[in-house]
Amino acid sequence: MASYRLGVRIGNWLEDEYAHQDLLRDFIRKREQGQLLVQRLARLQENIFKRVELSVSSDGFVHFGDTVLLMNPDSKSRDLEGTSEERDPEMCGDVTLAVDMEEVSLYSDEPLQISRGLSAAKRVDPIGRNAFCIVSADGSAVGEPLRYGQNFLLGTKGGVSDKLFYLASDHKTFKNFAKKSRLQKVFLTAEVSYLAVWQAKSLDPQLRLEHEGFPVPADTKIIITHCYTNRNLAVPRTFCVWSYFGREFEVVCHNYLDSHRAEEDKNHWEIITANPGSEDGTMHDRPKAFPEGYKKKLDS
């Protein structure tokens, strides 16, 4: 006859019981403090997906103090232009500059911190992680228009932080470069320095001198240049990063020029403002205006 049955515990069961009690107490403590992984993830999603109100441009220009989106528009035909990889539907569509969620640590007991990395997300609705503020670098007052060739900063709270972090870049070195493309990387910094200073330039290189000093129009393609390195903000869509929220694109500083020495669409950006109409949303979502009678002619 067997001395033990399956239900009998063999070993130092008293110490095992104490260990289980410690685990239970640790679980209860973390739950009360909101430090469980599921709680931290839910809080992160709530913050970064919280809708942000963009600034309305009454005169059609970008102003210091405006809350905007930085969008790299999709201007490539899937049928005619680009390699087969670039024509991939996953590579197409408008993307916005956003805080990279890949580097946010959910496994630490420390409070959630803003990631210093950036990516391009396939979202054009304003949320915590992709809303940026136009900040003066030369003492210009809030409400004054940003002008071509004028220095400015791009600040964000990323939906997590209580203070602004600024878009910055620095020269590529043997140890400091973008992970995927190995080009000059961009990052967020809490320090205001020349590494965080940018300029807006006209899309047409032949008109840049003529446009310098004029206000920058909102919702219009421009080039955003890093002053310290003279490299342009870019989204090469062939380099992808993965985060908690899916596949996104790496953002770098690099000059992509065609045979005419003009910037390619990887360097094209639009500063998106809010729609002043009753439809809400952004100016990018607003229907295109047609001359009187033009729509009727199309319908007929």
Image (cartoon, rainbow, N blue to C red):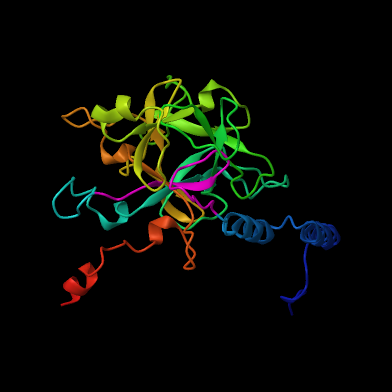
* Any part of residue 123 in sight: no
Residue 77: x, y in percent? 19, 52
Q: In this view, does 208 lie to the left or right of 169?
A: left
The answer to whether any part of residue 156 appears in the image is yes
Q: Quadrant of residue 30?
A: bottom right
**Total marks drawn?**
0
Q: Which of 37 and 23 is in front in this view?
A: 37
225 above or below 35? above
Q: In this view, does 26 lie to the left or right of 210?
A: right
The x and y percentages for residue 147 are 44, 32
Q: Residue at x 62, y 27 (%)?
A: 191
| Point 41% across, 28% down: residue | 213
Give me the residue at 57% from left, 52% from top: 128
Is residue 141 or residue 161 the one in the foreground? 141
Quadrant of image for the N terminus = bottom right
Left or right? Give the position of 5 relative to 205: right
Above or below residue 122? Residue 253 is above
The boundaries of the magenta stretch are: 54-75
Q: Quadrant of residue 32?
A: bottom right
